[in-house]
Image (cartoon, rainbow, N blue to C red):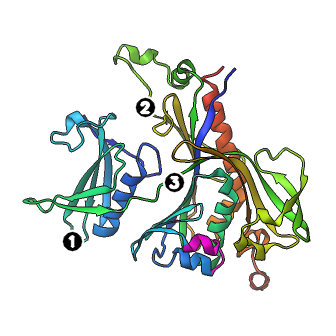
Amino acid sequence: MEAVPVDFEPSQAVPDETVHVARTVVAERGTLTSIALAPHETQPGTRFPNRPQGCYFDFNGSKPNGTSVRTQMGLGEKSSALVVDPLAQASPRVKSFPAPPRPRERYRVLQRWEGTITQVAGATFVAQLRDLTDPSHPLEVGEFSLDEVHEDDLGLLDVGAVFYWSVGYMHQALGQRRLTSEVRLRRITWTESELKHIDEPSALDQFFDVG
Amino acid sequence: MAQPICEVEGITVILVGHFNPALVQPAWLARNQLVRDAEANSADIQLIRSELSLFQVGPFTIQVELERFVVSIVDIGQAGPLRDLIVSIFALLNHTPVSQLGLNRMMHFRMPSEETYQRVGNVLVPKEPWTELLREPGVRSVTMLGKRPESAATRVQVTVEPSIKVMPRGIYVAVNEHFELGAQDAAPAMAALTTNWDAALVHARRVADAVVQVGIT
């Protein structure tokens, strides 16, 4: 059976670790030329005979000196990635690379808003809130305690400052579910108007065009 | 009637261009006030090298390669901060050439019943043409290409698969909005990002909701 090419985009079909391995192969050894997903039964000697999905990834690449690199990884492989260097025929050299950080919790957002601070007074601040979950909702006004704000964000609090507020459930690894509320002040080094004007001709451009 | 529930969700932004992996690291982000100091100090650094940088800082997972820049979140409540972070990074690194941009929203739904779960696959890919050819035909993956109205994106790709994160009765829907930019610097990518951010995310969710709803109706 012919191998099926796999799009090298983040997808659940290509586990993060597998993508990471492929990219590490690229970074460590040269250029990745192809990735294929092939059924087990067509590949004798596979290292993953018991994978429920019955497939593995086959990475082919080339080193800068032109020699080829090939490595395989099972679909659904979750452990730290092992990369076998097939160029060492007698005794395959096995390298271990760190897997990408995996989230320990998962989140289910119930609602999120973008707020613009209109007043800061004492231990509270007032903001106009735009519903990001359903933008058709009208603007709302809310009052927040400064205790809601992370201490590293307090210096950003000012009238006109923008923040994001989300409310939802955090599901922890052991099955515990907690209702969470987070306020995060916007940190930017740009303004939207600056961005919009990037592609527009400057006064100098217009001067030379006219000239 | 019970409805599908989106139990796991994430956003990934991918930039293709020429990057400096060793430059982008938690301390640099904190120094430029793009993340909280506490987040930078507690960052989970997997690898920082000249060819590959990989770490988690606050809610952001960042992977920088020589030709790819990938930032992900698994808490959709951090969507706005994710956009701000990327645009701010490339406001500082504004001469970075970025040729492609991908906005990806991935969602894992749990269907309320086995029947509704099966119906999604049956409606998207009717089994009739396959029953003569295969025993127990089942949908492994469906990919559709198209465009989003009012978007300058080159294409929108929707992928529907059985979920491997939500089981049983889990359906995975990923929506990728892809921009071909061919630019000499980062400005067009950042303009595309900010212009399309909210609409692309809302559209992705609308697509996913519609896909799983075919199992209900």
Residue A151 lies in quadrant: bottom right
Q: Earlier in the sequence, mark 1 or mark 3?
A: 1
Residue type at numbered disc 3? Pro
Confirm whether residue B94 shows in the render. Answer: no
Side (left or right) of A30 relative to B108 = left
Near-viewer residue (B111 or B215): B111
Residue type at numbered disc 1? Asn
Q: Position of residue B121 (x, y in %)?
A: 51, 25
Q: Position of residue B115 (x, y in %)?
A: 54, 18
The circle drawn on residue B140 is 2
Near-viewer residue (B70 or A131): A131
* Mark 2 vs mark 3: in front: 3
Quarter of the picture containing the N terminus of chain B is top right
User: Vertically, is A50 above or below A141?
Assistant: above
Q: Residues under labels 2 and 1: Cα distance?
A: 39 Å
* Mark 1 vs mark 3: in front: 3
Residue linked to disc 1: A65
The chain to which mark 1 is attached is: A
